[in-house]
Amino acid sequence: MMLEKEYRILVVDDAKDTQMLLEFDLSAAGYQVTCCDCGEDALESMETQEVDLILLDMYMPGLSGLETLARIKAQAISAEIPVIMLSASTDEDEVVAALELGAGDYVAKPYVAKVLLARMRTAIRLKEKTAQLEYLAKTDFLTGINNRGSFFELSNNAISLAKRAGQSLVVAMFDIDFFKQVNDNYGHDAGDQVLLAFSQGMIEVFRGYDIIGRVGGEEFAVCLPNTSRENANLACERFRNFIEQLSVRIISDNNVETEIHITVSIGLVLAQNDSLTIDELLKLADSALYYAKEHGRNQVVDAIILATTDESDNIVVSLMNTDEIDNNNLLQDSVIMTNFDGIDFDVGVSNVLGDEDLFKEILVMFYQDHHLDGDKLQSAIQEQDIDSVKHIAHTLKGVACSVGAMDLFEVTKALDIAVNDDKQEDFTRLFSQLSPEINRVMQGIKLQLDVS
Ligand SMILES: [Mg+2]
């Protein structure tokens, strides 16, 4: 019987004559054989070479067969390798002990070659079957990438690792736009071909150590370990573009070959809170994805905008749509540092994915729209026009946060809360804190940028 591949067998036996016999019989059957005289050597040799099966003598000087077996099963590198024990003794207690320690089988010496070879084949086949079953249990049957369960397991491991190493990690969710139409117009086989092409694209665009998975029908996800928010946005934008350019050749139900084009909506989130699990991160990414779907599809949305839109309705939303951002700018590291009084430039720039020029344009707009807010607030407070106070404070709070004016954000937030709690007695005091802060920020912008 021919072997499907050249399996490597490690023979561990202190008796030279047994080694020679085994080497002869096994080689004749098509195996590659390596021999070791003792358990210590065997353990060492497994660190450097791959082994498909181990034949292990029960009685050896130094480490006994059982001790060697225990060590083989204790180390990850060799734990899965099938072991067949060889012994002249037929002590049943020993056989039981060996099987309990994880030996796959037991063959008496002197061995009958035909019997030993049959048992070796069975042990190897069993090992391969188990590996195959494990693979199937973790793999999406259609695309061959991680299924939902495996994606969750691997991602949670990656999250724990990232926590320990203090590295940032990003999770993104993908949904193929109008996928139902593909199924409706061309049939489910065509739909499957699209899913397959899509997953191939993920394998191509993302890195080898990124964890990709199919988490629902036309929903996919990726977990990006050791990745900054900026780079994750870049990678997702690159993938969005890749899918947009892709033409998928499908055979429709009536046997006509057609090329179709698809787009993808993407939501992503940076894991910031230490206690977040993959379920929670996917929910946040999914909210961003939902936002992308609601705002025209075929785009990447960072969950950070959801936090800022809550504060100020729709004010900063358009800033985060990566469609509007020139990718070339994103690739340049921000070399020039600019100082704006009262503004955390890094925060502001990172809110627009690292595009400094875009951020400066936004600062100009911010100045134009809000440099009179201090005066407006003052008169609204004097006239007890609570609606206006509320509107200005609420809007300014959201915008201040998105441009990185964090001190201004804090004092405006306090006023916003006072308005909501109807604490009018606090308005004047809070305004006296807000007023110099807004002047500081506006003067800072005016000094650096052309705001006329
Ligand atoms: Mg011996």
Image: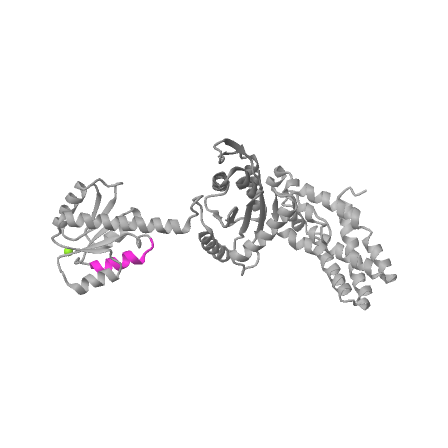
Residue 342 visible somewhere in the drawing: no
Residue 256 lies in the magenta stretch: no
Report how many numbered discs are placed on residues in the image.
0
Query: Splitting the image into 4 quarters, where does residue 416 fall?
Result: bottom right
User: Which secondary structure is most common in the magenta stretch?
Assistant: helix
Q: In which quarter of the image is ligand 1?
A: bottom left
Please name whichever residue, 425 or 314, is drawn nearer the observer in this view of the structure.
314
Q: Is residue 21 left or right of residue 414?
A: left
- Quarter of the picture holding the C terminus: top right
Report the residue that reaches farthest toward the front: 254
Read off the magenta span. Answer: 64-76
Q: Where's residue 222, x and y in %?
A: 51, 48
Report the residue that reaches farthest toward the right: 383
Q: Where's residue 206, x and y in %?
A: 50, 43
Q: Where's residue 183, x and y in %?
A: 53, 41
Q: Residue at position x 23%, y 60% from top?
A: 99
- Quarter of the picture holding the N terminus: top left
Q: In this view, does 230 lie above or below 61?
A: above
Report the residue that reaches farthest toward the top: 257
Q: Where's residue 157, x and y in %?
A: 46, 55
Residue 72 lies in the magenta stretch: yes
Q: How is the image coloured?
A: one colour
Query: Splitting the image into 4 quarters, where does residue 321 fall?
Result: top right
Residue 441 visible somewhere in the drawing: yes
Q: Is residue 261 left or right of residue 65?
A: right
